[in-house]
Amino acid sequence: MALKRFSISLDNELLKRFDDIIKRKRYNNRSKVIADLIRNYLVEEEWKFEDRDSIGTINIVYDHHKRNLLNKLTEVQHKYHSQIVSDTHVHLDHNNCLEVIIVKGKTGIIKKVAEDIIKIKGIKFGKLSIATKGKEL
Ligand code: NI
């Protein structure tokens, strides 16, 4: 991989805060952090295009006693069976469950799957985490 050097002009105070975090996190140098930030930004930008192939996870927390919730959740997952890669269930306590659903496909459909799952009545927490298949990074 060819490396290229470039310089950045930053507000003094901003740079100080940045360096404090780098020190706290024990990164060896700024370059790695800047590269990570840029890659994150590229992945976020990729998700703005509905027709890109990507991958992500949907994290949900719910009370499994809620009437109809499990039926609805299964129904939605069957509807999008082509996009759903796997589903991991963790029993958190007597009432609460955490599920991590891995979804793959066009970003537009993945967003729709996440929306349809998160809006199910009784879901206490729901979030789509965007990831990337890693090409071009
Ligand atoms: Ni459970």
Image: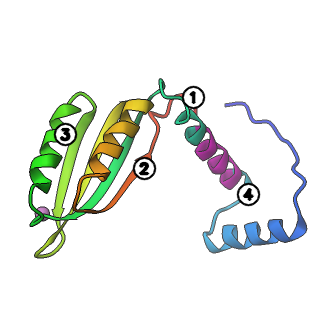
Q: Secondary structure at mark 3?
A: helix
Q: Secondary structure at mark 1?
A: loop
Instruction: Give the alpha-carbon distance from disc 4 to disc 1, as whole Å.
Output: 22 Å
Mark 4 neighbour class, 10 Å CA radius: few under 14, some 14 to 19, many 20 or more? few
Q: Is residue 106 visible?
A: no
| 44 relative to 107, above or below | below
Please say whether residue 37 is one of the residues in the magenta stretch: yes
Q: Which residue is mark 2?
A: 129
Residue at x 39%, y 42% (from the top left corner): 56
Quadrant assignment for the N terminus: top right
Name the mark on residue 76.
none
Instruction: Give the alpha-carbon distance from disc 4 to disc 2, as whole Å.
Output: 26 Å
Residue at x 10%, y 76% (from the top left corner): 94
Residue at x 75%, y 36% (from the top left corner): 3
Q: Nearer the viewer, mark 1 or mark 3?
A: 3
- Residue 67 horizontal/vertical position (percent): 9, 61
Mark 1 neighbour class, 10 Å CA radius: few under 14, some 14 to 19, many 20 or more? few
Q: Which residue is mark 3?
A: 77
Instruction: Give the alpha-carbon distance from disc 1 to disc 2, as whole Å.
Output: 19 Å
Instruction: Give the alpha-carbon distance from disc 4 to disc 3, as whole Å.
Output: 42 Å
Q: Which residue is mark 1?
A: 136
Q: For the magenta stretch, what is the residue range?
A: 32-42
In the drawing, does residue 113 fall left or right of residue 14? left
Looking at numbered disc 4 in the image, what kind of residue is underneath it? Arg
Instruction: Give the alpha-carbon distance from disc 2 to disc 3, as whole Å.
Output: 17 Å
